[in-house]
Image: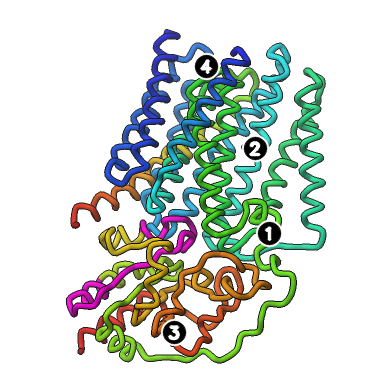
Amino acid sequence: MNIIVDGSYFIAAILFILGLKQMSSPVTARRGIIWAGVGMVLATIITYLHQDIHHNYFWMTLAIAIGGTIAWITGKKVAMTDMPQMIALYNGMGGGAAAAIAAVVLIQNDSSHGVTHQALAVLGALIGAISFSGSMIAFAKLQGIMWKVYRFKNQQWINLAVFLTTIMIGLHLSFSGADYSMGLLVFFFVLALAFGIMMTIPIGGADMPVVISLYNAFTGLAVGFEGYVLANPAMMIAGIVVGSAGTLLTQLMAKAMNRPITNVLFSNFGEGGTGDAEAVTGSMKEIEASDVAVMMAFAEKVIIIPGYGMAVAQAQHKVWEMTKLLQERGVTVKFAIHPVAGRMPGHMNVLLAEAGVPYDIIYDLDEINEEFATADVSLVIGANDVVNPAARTDTNSPIYGMPILNADYAKNTIVIKRGKGTGFSGIENQLFFADNTRMLYGDGAVATNELISGIKEL
Amino acid sequence: MEGFIALYIFMLAAFTGYEIISKVPVILHTPLMSGSNFVHGIVLVGAMVVMGNAETGIQTFVGFIAVILAAGNAVGGYVVTERMLEMFKSSRGKK
């Protein structure tokens, strides 16, 4: 019996690692998730035979059915554009599960396992709870339920105080043997959950992808630690693999934005600058869709820069339709993707792939930034911060130093934008006021549609 | 479990995770984050063990919540990852 369970966990762990490995190449990615899925199903079914499970089989199955069904329906229904917040949501659930496991272990309060056991249970509880509440806030922000960025005076000191108090209680829970009350345990979880919320509410805008990735790594670690507590190698391996992979991914993202991870977490976007940002000069100049259509149809090279606005408007299909029309007219069309365009790295790639845009005309920042100087038109669709020239020049700007797409180096820049306001980060964009920039106001899909009919009429 | 064996497992797993991610094209960052999000859905196994081992009503209840959350993580993580990667397949087919 034991051998079956342990052997299955071993096979599941191998399938997870091989699955993730295959997911790191586009050719084998799809097979990778299926392998990992097989591992998960195997491990779950075999767990019914686990020697530590004595009862509650019915309720356990019911709980799996409830959680699984809700997740299945929401996961199937959600639009591609809303993927990032769904990842945040499911990730938060995993963190919550790890914290709940820790809670049961700590309620049982069996000190015979020793200090390491207790300390890792507490650590997993802390990280899992932070990941849970933090991910829920990230979900709410991306879903648009909670737009506001909450900041107040001395926020970081208050956060620090809460964090240190949580740590102190955690140490007490870890090292006092069985000597703690239920009240203290509850207080510990309340503080940990509160810290997750407080840590996330001041973070906004372009930093959200990094935060989601960080919480993904957190959940992995929490699962790994609880795996130790439950003496479950499959959880230990899978959890720590995700914890380390997620940490590296978080660093890659933070690096792409040229913002150290500590800045993302502790210096709020919009407060990074030491003084007032340079005043923006000039005015925004509007243009008609038909004029843009002419401009692009007779251009040699057009570079399209998609951003979150394209995702919101679900304009990716229209954009590809327009691209094909331009290609038929002999225009070279390329897509330039900023690493943090949208709400997650690769977010735009996923959307363009959905619309059917082939890989070989989609370029990363490093590959294409030289080419803007030779482009006739750079078309910005719903992107903002990633093309803001202030990042190059204005040392006072909160985004100073972030690599940007040099959309302003093209002969003409067209910006499709819903309104005159600032973007998600709330920073004015000098590009919109530049001499060779024209604004095409409107929803991304509607505006692109106008461009399509404009090109067709020529 | 022996402390040092656990430490070895943690260390090797950490290297494995690092190695897997270090050569990934940007294009796959989101699906991979989603995929790793699915993999830590293995927490479901732990949640089931804890629930099957619960001694009191409150423990059973917390375990019940844990299983619901963990199942959501595993199933939701799989569905969204699969949907994303499916699109990559179709786009390659057209090329």
Q: For the N terminus of chain A, which image quadrant?
A: top left
Q: How many numbered circles are shown?
A: 4
Task: Give the residue at mark 4.
Answer: A55
- Does the magenta segment cover residue A311? no
Check disc 2 and give the amino acid type. Ile
Q: Residue B92 or A223: which is nearer the viewer?
A: B92
Q: Secondary structure at mark 3?
A: strand
**Same-chain check, marks 3 and 2:** yes
Q: Chain of mark 4?
A: A
Check disc 4 and give the amino acid type. His
Where residue A401 is drawn, which disc sits there?
none
Q: Residue A64 or A37: which is nearer the viewer?
A: A37
Task: Give the residue at mark 1.
Answer: A202
The magenta-colored residue range is: A321-350
- Does the magenta segment cover residue A333? yes
Q: Can residue B40 be seen at all in this image of the molecule?
A: no
Where residue A441 is drawn, which disc sits there?
3
Q: Residue at x 57, y 72 (%)?
A: A392
Q: Residue at x 23, y 53 (%)?
A: B92
Check disc 3 and give the amino acid type. Tyr
Left/right of residue A78 with respect to residue A433 in the rendered view: left
Q: Secondary structure at mark 1?
A: loop
Indicate which disc, 4 or 1, sits on the residue closer to the N terminus: 4
Task: Give the residue at mark 2.
Answer: A127
